[in-house]
Image (cartoon, grey):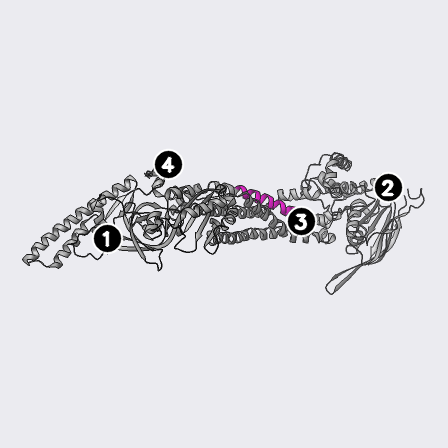
């Protein structure tokens, strides 16, 4: 696709991003000036060994953490220095997160988990008014990720693959611009993992969803359009996938 | 929206939270029970004090009183007649009560109140305090029917039963005197012969005295007869008894001239505490009351005259009734007597005009809430250099204040119980926050704000408070409603009377449920629950999403 259309504008960029973790006298410089550019509708995967700072980079991009130096920009506008409320809102509207350990809320069933970002977004009254519409949307999404029969199950009653599908459905319900996936297949067997990547590919193709995926598994990373390697706190090599 | 959903799920799934609900519940229930019983007691007490006094009391500073009762009443009616329902003059003075019991003279300090019983009954519920108007129950069984009809106006006549007792007593005394006289005559004859010694006779007299029945059981309560009284109408020829009273010589002689059973001119209602004492039955271990004197007996009252300088003024009086208010302070201090006799003895009746002096006026109002207003009105005619005009609450201010302070301190202590429950909530919430760290991270990654996270735990705390205090209110009210049944069960289980009616004078535990108290206790508990959850909630809110997410 990338070779058919002209190069799309950059969507999410990081400029000279640096992050240092301090623990008393110990000082670990995790990221040392990372420059990364994600274009609109691009599927980018970041690979690297564990401890290389991939997750930290993803957290910085998704505003879960703030950088020590450098900037994060969305559509050219800096977003990492915004007030907490605005950043919370951006997390809710612009970014979708998928984690290695799914991170579903154990007290809620799958459809409630999928609905939870919308519950956070809307006030009680607004949510109550639109509950039927929103519930329909959530169940459509669950059907789409293949969980139509599991809606009322609690997270501890379904398998890992199903949990990750539910987590993806949850990240999609807000119709995000960027999906940030942190080792989405890390806890799954190979076949299930492939299924998840398949789903991500499909979303990327059909909805032009920009995706950043962090993984240590190169075979998984290869399914993305572009691969970036993070090593010693810097972007090392770039490889564009030829369609 | 998510706040409520998550809060509700946490409530349903965290059973540890039940512990805090229970602790709040118990605290609230305890406070409600204790407060209800306390206000029940103090309500009863106030009712009794109020009943004994009147809505408004006008007192002269001087024990000599002020002249012309009718004028004073007219003055009061002139300025506040529209508010006044009834008014009665009284004379209040200090005095001493003497009576003979088991060969000893008992002396008690008293406050002597001269009243007109019919007038006093219009001002306050006098009948409620007089023993003869009440039936006596013991363990639910009737042991004595009331001696007077409920519609009988209180008066200075003995009830038929007391009159019978008096006749019987005087007859026995007479018989005893005759025996003594006979012995004396014999002795005199012997002495003439010069063969008997005086000491032997004395022992004989004492033997006769010992043979007299010294204790009779009436109404299931052993009543000891005042043995000393027997020697009261002593003849001149008798040797002086150590229990003899010099003034006794006059009164009985006067009686014998007319009706031997006639009552004394002085009549009294005597406080139960003055003529009885509790004791433990050595056989059954039961607490019983020993009556040292009873209606129909004569006693001696000493007071002072209203003249200058005050002089000793003793007189004899017949106990007409026993007065029992349930307030120890009154029951062991007050003696009501007939107003006229007291005025006569104290020289308060002007020999020239025949006008009678009084020391106080008891006033009953049509609307007791207007007492303060009436006090203001009355002050205009009763100047403060001579009189004090007060409502009954003002007159009993220190006592009522003491009760109030007591209950305030108790409330503070009890509120500490709920505070303990609050710390329980704090600890449990802290645990839940730690346990839910990852969920907090998830919610934050989904865009939940710190204040949103905080409100989850605050509303969780509020929910626990609401549930706990709701359950506590229900439990407390049930406890209060069935408090006497619970008392019975506890008595049965422990084998010890938990609530002894002989000590408290109440047939059952008095309770008074005040809605305002319940509301404030429940709100206080909710507030404490919310306050206790602030600290854990703040901690949850301040958690870093990445750190929380990393936690497994």
Instruction: Give the number of the disc on residue B151.
Output: 4
Measured in 3D between alpha carbons, the distance from the residue under mark 3 to the one under mark 1, in whole angstroms, is 91 Å
Considering the numbered disc 1 on the image, is that residue within a helix, a strand or a loop? helix
Q: Nearer the viewer, mark 3 or mark 1?
A: 1
Q: Find the distance from the CA under tag 2 to the CA under tag 4.
A: 99 Å
CB of mark 3 within 8 Å of CB of mark 1? Answer: no
Chain bearing tag 1 is: B
Q: Which residue has dot 1 on it? A: B248
Camera-side residue of A96 and B1: B1
Q: Nearer the viewer, residue B416 or B46?
A: B46
Q: Earlier in the sequence, mark 3 or mark 1?
A: 1
Q: Which residue is mark 3?
A: B436
Give percent across and percent down for residue B28.
54, 47
Q: Are marks 3 and 1 on the same chain?
A: yes
Instruction: Indicate which disc, 3 or 4, sits on the residue closer to the N terminus.
Output: 4
Mark pair 2, 1: CA separation: 123 Å
**Dot 3: what SS?**
loop
Separation of marks 1 and 4 at Cα, in angstroms? 37 Å
Magenta part mainly helix, strand or loop? helix
Q: Where does label 2 land, which residue?
A: A208
Q: Is residue B49 left or right of residue A30?
A: left
Instruction: Mark 1 vs mark 4: tell me if same chain.
Output: yes
Q: Residues within 10 Å of mark 1 (few under 14, many from 20)?
A: some
Q: Nearer the viewer, mark 3 or mark 4?
A: 4
Residue B151 on image: x %, y % = 37, 36
Residue B498 in view of the camera: no
Looking at the image, which residue is at 57% across and 47% down? B520
- Which is closer to the viewer, label 1 or label 4? 1
């Amino acid at each position: 696709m990338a070779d058919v259309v002209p190069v799309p504008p950059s969507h999410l960029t990081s400029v000279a991003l640096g992050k240092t973790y301090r623990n008393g006298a110990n000082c670990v410089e995790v990221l040392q000036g990372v420059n990364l550019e994600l274009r609109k509708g691009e599927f980018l995967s970041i690979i690297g060994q564990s401890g290389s700072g991939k997750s930290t980079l993803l957290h910085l991009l998704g505003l879960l953490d703030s950088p020590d130096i450098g900037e994060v920009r969305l559509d050219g506008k800096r977003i990492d220095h915004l007030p907490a409320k605005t950043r919370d809102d951006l997390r809710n509207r612009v970014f979708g997160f998928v984690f290695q350990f799914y991170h579903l809320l154990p007290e809620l069933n799958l459809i409630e988990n999928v609905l939870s970002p919308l519950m956070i977004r809307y006030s009680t009254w607004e949510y109550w008014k639109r509950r039927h519409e929103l519930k329909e949307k959530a169940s459509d999404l669950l059907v789409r990720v293949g969980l139509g029969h599991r809606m009322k199950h609690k997270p501890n009653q379904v398998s890992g693959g199903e949990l990750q599908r539910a987590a993806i459905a949850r990240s999609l319900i807000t119709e995000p611009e960027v999906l940030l996936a942190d080792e989405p297949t890390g806890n799954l067997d190979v076949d299930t993992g492939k299924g998840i990547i398949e789903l991500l590919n499909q979303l990327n193709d059909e909805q032009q969803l920009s995706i950043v995926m962090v993984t240590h598994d190169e075979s998984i990373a290869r399914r993305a359009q572009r691969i970036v390697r993070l090593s010693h706190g810097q972007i090392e090599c770039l490889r564009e996938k030829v369609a | 929206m998510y706040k409520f959903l998550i809060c509700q799920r946490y409530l349903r799934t965290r059973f540890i939270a039940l512990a805090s609900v229970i602790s709040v519940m118990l605290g609230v229930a305890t406070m409600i029970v204790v407060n209800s019983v306390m206000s029940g007691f103090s309500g009863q007490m106030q009712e009794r004090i109020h009943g004994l006094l009147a809505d408004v009391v006008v007192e002269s500073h001087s024990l000599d009183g002020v002249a012309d009762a009718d004028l004073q009443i007219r003055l009061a009616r002139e300025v506040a007649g529209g508010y006044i329902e009834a008014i009665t003059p009284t004379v209040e003075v200090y005095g001493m009560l003497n009576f003979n019991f088991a060969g000893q003279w008992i002396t008690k300090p008293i406050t002597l109140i001269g009243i007109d019983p019919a007038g006093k009954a219009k001002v306050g519920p006098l009948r409620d305090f007089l023993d003869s108007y009440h039936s006596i129950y013991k363990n639910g069984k009737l042991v004595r029917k009331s001696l007077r009809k409920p519609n009988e106006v209180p008066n200075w006549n003995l009830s038929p039963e007391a009159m019978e007792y008096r006749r019987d007593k005087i007859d026995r005394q007479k018989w005893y005197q005759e025996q003594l006289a006979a012995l004396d005559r014999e002795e005199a004859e012997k002495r003439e012969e010069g063969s008997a010694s005086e000491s032997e006779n004395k022992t004989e007299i004492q033997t006769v005295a010992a043979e007299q029945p010294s204790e009779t059981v009436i109404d299931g309560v052993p009543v000891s007869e005042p043995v000393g009284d027997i020697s009261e109408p002593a003849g001149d020829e008798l040797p002086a008894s150590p229990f003899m009273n010099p003034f006794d010589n006059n009164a009985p002689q006067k009686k014998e001239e007319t009706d031997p059973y006639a009552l004394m001119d002085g009549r009294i209602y005597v406080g139960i505490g003055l003529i009885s004492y509790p004791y433990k039955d050595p056989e059954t271990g039961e607490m019983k009351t020993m009556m040292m004197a009873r209606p129909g007996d004569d006693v001696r009252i000493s007071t002072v005259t209203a003249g200058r300088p005050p002089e000793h003024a003793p007189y004899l009086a017949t106990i007409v009734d026993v007065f029992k208010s349930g307030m120890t302070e009154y029951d062991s201090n007050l003696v009501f007597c007939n107003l006229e006799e007291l005025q006569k003895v104290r020289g308060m009746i002007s020999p020239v005009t025949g006008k009678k002096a009084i020391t106080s006026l008891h006033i009953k109002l049509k609307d007791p809430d207007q007492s303060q207003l009436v006090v203001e009105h009355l002050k205009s005619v009763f100047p403060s250099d001579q009189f004090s005009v007060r409502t009954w609450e003002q007159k009993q201010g220190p006592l009522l204040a003491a009760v109030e302070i007591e209950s305030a301190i108790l409330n503070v202590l009890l509120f500490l119980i709920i505070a303990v429950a609050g710390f329980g909530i704090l600890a449990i919430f802290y645990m839940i926050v730690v346990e839910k760290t990852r969920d907090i991270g998830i919610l934050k990654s989904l865009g939940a704000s710190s204040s949103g996270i905080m409100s989850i735990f605050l509303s969780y705390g509020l929910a626990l408070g609401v549930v706990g205090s709701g359950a506590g209110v229900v439990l407390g009210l049930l406890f209060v409603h069935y408090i006497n049944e619970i008392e019975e069960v506890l008595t049965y289980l422990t084998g010890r009377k938990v609530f002894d009616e002989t000590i408290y004078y109440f047939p059952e535990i008095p309770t008074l449920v005040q809605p305002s108290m319940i509301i404030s206790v429940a709100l206080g508990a909710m507030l404490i629950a919310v306050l206790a959850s602030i600290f854990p909630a703040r901690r949850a809110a301040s958690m870093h999403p990445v750190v929380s997410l990393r936690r497994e």
